[in-house]
Image (cartoon, rainbow, N blue to C red):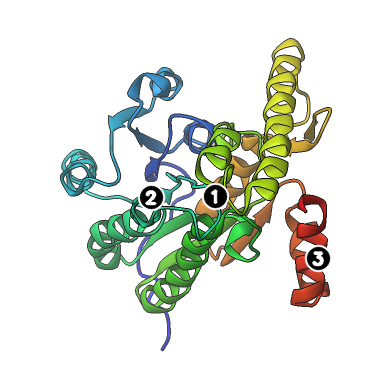
Amino acid sequence: MASHRTGVREKAGRVCLVTGASSGIGLATALELLRAGHIVYGAARRVPRMTPIVAAGGYALPLDVTEEDDLQRVVSTLLDRHGRIDVLVNNAGAVVHGAAEDTPVAMARDLFEVNVLAPARLAQLVLPGMRLRGSGTIVNVSSIGGVIALPLGAWYYASKHALEAFSDTLRMEVEQFGVDVVVIRPGVIRTGFEAGAARQLREVSGHGAYGRMAEAMARAAEAQTIAEAQTDAQADAETHTDAQADVDGPAFRATDPVVVAEVIRRAVEADRPQTRYVVGWQAEALLNLRKSLTDRDFDARVTGPLL
């Protein structure tokens, strides 16, 4: 079926809703869209951390993505004020660490509520208006974990795989109405997202059959957290002249979230965006490695250092 792109897709002045906007990729994306001249609403539980968005001319709304009333209130606020939502960036996310056998199903259920059901529900809420206008963009922030999977993160990887599948189906359904669905696959990004990984690994799986693997991964996570902190201190002391440059850390390299934000902004402003964007250190390399190896070879490469 042919696409019906009847809406006007202006380069600037689009009304944008960005979830998870209190830090990391969400905050960087809100600020990037504001710099490009768009009308931006950041939404998150930690409203005080969205002060930079307000200072830059945007708006900050409280949002718990697991609460239906909150989702409806935020969407209604934008529609009441502007009559439309042109762009939805589903960035809010959560992570659970631990062996699949050890992780309580309640934790997994809560994770899927944030990583899958909330983006899906927000898409349901914004789509009627987008369909009527014949234009709109829904950006779902996934991960390279939407393609590959590593030990002690089964539920997180499952949620990102589910988000990617949902996005594929949604894209095929709404393209006929001029609505684009875009998946962003970040690699290793300097966001602090994994700050609690070591503690959770030890709590969930540190004392049972998977203890050795959990401790190895916990130590790696601690090294990454230290490297991120040192990188942040270095970044505060230096003037960045190249937003596309990766940030060096003593134990790893992580991409500045600004780089991801720029990719999202380009996707939002494109007349015909790609269906997927891979961005960040190790993203392409890990995806290519996974493609090049058999399942058994990939398993051995990943688990060898942990056992």
Query: How much space separates mark 3 and mark 1, taking CA atoms?
Result: 19 Å
Callout 2: helix, strand or loop? helix
Please identify the quarter of the rendering in which residue 297 is found: bottom right
Is 302 situated left or right of 3 in this image? Answer: right
Name the kind of residue labelled 2 in the image.
Answer: Met
Mark seen at residue 254: none
* Residue at 73%, 38% in the rendered image: 220
Counting residues from the start of the chain, the first of labels 3 and 1 encountered is: 1
Indicate the position of residue 59 as horizontal and vertical percent values.
33, 28
Name the kind of residue labelled 1 in the image.
Answer: Gly
Asked if labels 2 and 1 touch by Cβ distance under 8 angstroms, the answer is yes
Mark seen at residue 300: 3
Residue 279's place in the image compared with 289, above or below, is above
Furthest residue to the front?
Answer: 208
Q: In the rendered image, which residue does mark 1 sit on?
A: 98
Is 254 situated left or right of 193 in this image? Answer: right
Indicate the position of residue 143 as horizontal and vertical percent values.
59, 55
Please identify the quarter of the rendering in which residue 3 is found: bottom left
Indicate the position of residue 121 as horizontal and vertical percent values.
28, 58
* Residue at 39%, 70% in the rendered image: 178
Mark seen at residue 107: 2
Query: How much space separates mark 3 and mark 2, taking CA atoms?
Result: 28 Å
Is 58 situated left or right of 100 in this image? Answer: left
Task: Specify whether residue 255 is in view.
Answer: no
Residue 34's place in the image compared with 226, above or below, is below
Task: Specify whether residue 54 is in view.
Answer: yes
* Residue at 28%, 39% in the rendered image: 64
Counting residues from the start of the chain, the first of labels 3 and 2 encountered is: 2
Counting residues from the start of the chain, the first of labels 1 and 2 encountered is: 1
